[in-house]
Amino acid sequence: MQDTAQFELSDFEKGIIIGYHKCGRSSKDISRDLKYPKSTVAYVIKKWKVSGDCRNVPRVGRPTKLEDGDRRVLTREIRKNSTQPMALIREGLNGRVASALALGTTGFGFESRRCHGCL
């Protein structure tokens, strides 16, 4: 298992803890066997007893504007036309990506691909 740094248990790991609990093991034994903190084991078991579910819920936040395929197309175009102005690259991409690209989104693509020096 992982070291005791801060991390989130996967659904599978939480299921293992619940399985140990259903077999009658104590929180202390589960913690020792799986090398998780006792507080984490107790929290997972308590959450499972109360709600009947201990899956990880998605985090809140703004959804990404570009899908993986769109991001690959953007990267390919930036590499191919690194000396062109951003506006021209954006116009060329708008017909080939699923969502319409704003100038800022295209600019972010330049920065995130470490191409900001090639403008």
Image: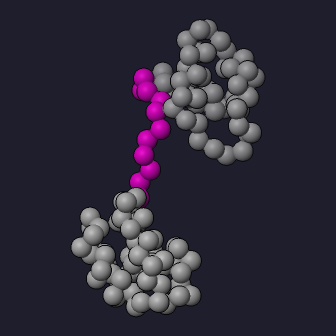
Q: Name the dominant secondary structure of the magenta segment.
A: loop
Q: Quadrant of residue 33?
A: top right
Residue 65 seen in this snapshot: yes
Whether residue 59 appears in magenta in the rendering, the answer is: yes
The residue positioned farthest toward the top in the image shown:
24
Q: Residue at position x 59%, y 22% from top?
A: 17
Vertical position of residue 118 compared to residue 111: above or below: below
Q: Quadrant of residue 90?
A: bottom left
Vertical position of residue 110 compared to residue 46: above or below: below
**Picture coordinates of residue 15, whole percent (x, y):** 53, 24
Could you say which is closer to the camera, residue 7 or residue 51?
Answer: 7
Residue 62 seen in this snapshot: no
> In the rendered view, does 112 fall on the left or right side of 94?
right
**Picture coordinates of residue 35, whole percent (x, y):** 74, 28
Number of numbered discs on residues: 0
> In the rendered view, does 2 fall on the left or right side of 78?
right
Could you say which is closer to the camera, residue 117 or residue 102?
Answer: 117
> In the rendered view, does 24 fall on the left or right side of 106?
right
Q: Residue at position x 40%, y 58% from top?
A: 68
* Quarter the N terminus occupies: top right
**Picture coordinates of residue 36, whole percent (x, y):** 70, 31
Q: Residue at position x 38%, y 68% from top?
A: 73
Task: Tell me where the magenta segment starts and ends, as one range.
Answer: 51-62
The residue positioned farthest toward the front in the image shown:
80
> In the rendered view, does 78 fall on the left or right side of 116?
left
Whether residue 116 appears in magenta in the rendering, the answer is: no
